[in-house]
């Protein structure tokens, strides 16, 4: 068995059959589809049963009661027989050649432990668009200073890496369990993304994409921030870590002083990266430039000219020359 496709399900009957069909109709055939039902109360169990009866590649597992995404995914990991594990959600649609292309890459790039792809976002009430993820593994590591670098339902990962280092989806990081898993994998292998959309990601009202940001969730995020910074040998004050967390939570309402503090925060991180992880410096500078630009452009509290902050970021070494020129041109022509 070469591939195990892992699909967790909880009350996903509405789109489940379409998701299953997109896997069973793949051009690549040597796989099992492990569907783990997490105590669904809709028609999901019946749909899973019918497919398991029709196609012996479908493996049906279930939790006796609703146990959450981490327990469900770990049950699937334990049952997987394939050399590679591919993730799939019960409301998305994989392109017919997704497995074929991801397996082909992993077979010829043994240094990679995790591979994603671009995704095509679609759904009622929105215009379909392509969401890009960086290809280069240096960029992926730098991206993870602020956010995840791959789309969870679009990934393939190497099972022997998971087993060798006893990696699991950690329930103490629920809501960012995938992000935490990728960070652990990146300690031992390269990660990246194919530059074509191999997954159609469905956007709909029922999906849970945002968790309540309560004190517990913020504490969990801060714990993860500290771990990432330690691994990258970046030393920040508590106030700087809080400012970083605000960016991660997309709180872009910075004042003039806070924008300047954020630029200096990015400069501090770049200096530490240059000292301890020089192979990441070019990628990190691009990521910092993107973060600063997003903060400046989205904040409604700043009163001074935005070009001032671009100049400050550039002269503080936080923005590559070409990024700075591009940003200034966009402002001049009104984009």
Image: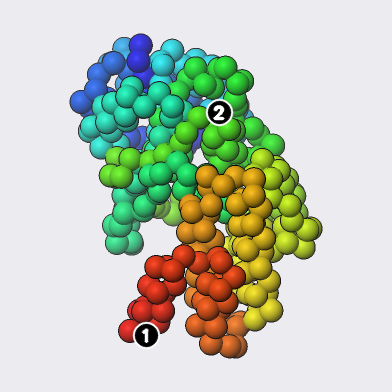
Q: Is residue 278 visible?
A: yes
Quadrant for the N terminus, please: top left
Furthest residue in direction left, as rendered: 27
Q: Is residue 41 visible?
A: no
Quadrant for the C terminus, please: bottom left
Residue carrying label 1: 332
Label 2 environment density (alpha carbons within 10 Å; few <14, some 14–19, many ≥20): few
> Residue 83 appears at what percent x and percent y?
41, 16
- Which of the two labelled residues, at mark 2 and mark 1, occupies the earlier sequence position? 2
Label 1 environment density (alpha carbons within 10 Å; few <14, some 14–19, many ≥20): few
Color theme of the render: rainbow
Q: Secondary structure at mark 2?
A: loop
* Identity of the residue drawn at 32% across and 35% down: 19
Q: 213 and 166: which one is in front?
A: 166
Q: Secondary structure at mark 1?
A: helix
Q: Label for residue 64?
A: none
> Residue 239 appears at what percent x and percent y?
77, 63
* Identity of the residue drawn at 37% across and 85% down: 332
> Residue 29 appears at what percent x and percent y?
25, 19
Locate residue 323: give its quadrant. Answer: bottom left
Q: 14 and 335: which one is in front?
A: 335
Q: Marks 2/1: CA distance?
A: 45 Å
Residue carrying label 2: 188
* Identity of the residue drawn at 36% across and 35% down: 16
Instruction: For the residues labelled 2 and 1, say whether their Cβ atoms are less than 8 Å apart.
Output: no
Give above or below for 14 relative to 320. above
Q: 166 and 54: which one is in front?
A: 166
> Residue 165 appears at what percent x and percent y?
60, 21
Left or right of 254, for residue 189: left
Locate residue 264: give its quadrant. Answer: bottom right
Q: 238 and 55: which one is in front?
A: 238
């Amino acid at each position: 068995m070469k591939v195990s496709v892992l699909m967790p399900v909880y009350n996903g009957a509405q789109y489940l059959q379409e998701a299953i069909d997109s896997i069973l109709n793949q051009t690549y055939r040597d796989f099992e589809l492990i569907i783990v039902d997490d105590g669904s109360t809709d028609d999901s169990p019946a749909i899973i049963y019918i497919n398991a009866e029709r196609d012996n590649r479908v493996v049906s597992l279930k939790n006796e009661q609703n146990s959450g995404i981490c327990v469900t995914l770990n049950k699937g990991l334990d049952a997987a027989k394939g050399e590679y594990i591919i993730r799939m959600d019960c409301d998305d649609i994989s392109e017919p050649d997704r497995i074929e292309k991801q397996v082909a890459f992993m077979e010829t790039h043994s240094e990679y432990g995790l591979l994603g792809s671009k995704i095509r976002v679609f759904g009622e009430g929105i215009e379909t668009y392509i969401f890009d993820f960086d290809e280069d593994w240096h960029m992926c590591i730098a991206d993870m200073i602020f956010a995840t670098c791959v789309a969870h339902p679009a990934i393939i990962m190497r099972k022997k890496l998971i087993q060798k280092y006893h990696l699991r989806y950690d329930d103490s990081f629920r809501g960012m369990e995938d992000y935490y898993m990728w960070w652990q994998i990146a300690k031992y292998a390269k990660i990246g993304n194919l530059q074509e959309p191999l997954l159609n990601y469905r956007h709909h009202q029922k999906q849970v994409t945002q968790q309540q940001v309560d004190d517990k969730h913020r504490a969990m995020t801060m714990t993860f921030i500290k771990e990432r910074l330690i691994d990258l040998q970046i030393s920040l004050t508590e106030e700087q870590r809080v400012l970083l967390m605000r960016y991660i939570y997309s709180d872009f309402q910075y004042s003039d002083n806070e924008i300047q503090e954020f630029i200096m925060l990015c400069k501090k991180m770049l200096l530490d990266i240059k000292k301890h992880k020089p192979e990441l410096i070019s990628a990190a500078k691009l990521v910092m430039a993107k973060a600063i630009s997003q903060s400046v452009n989205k904040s409604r509290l700043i009163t001074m000219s935005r070009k001032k902050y671009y100049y400050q970021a550039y002269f503080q070494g936080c923005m590559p020359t070409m990024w700075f020129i591009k940003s200034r041109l966009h402002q001049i022509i009104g984009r």
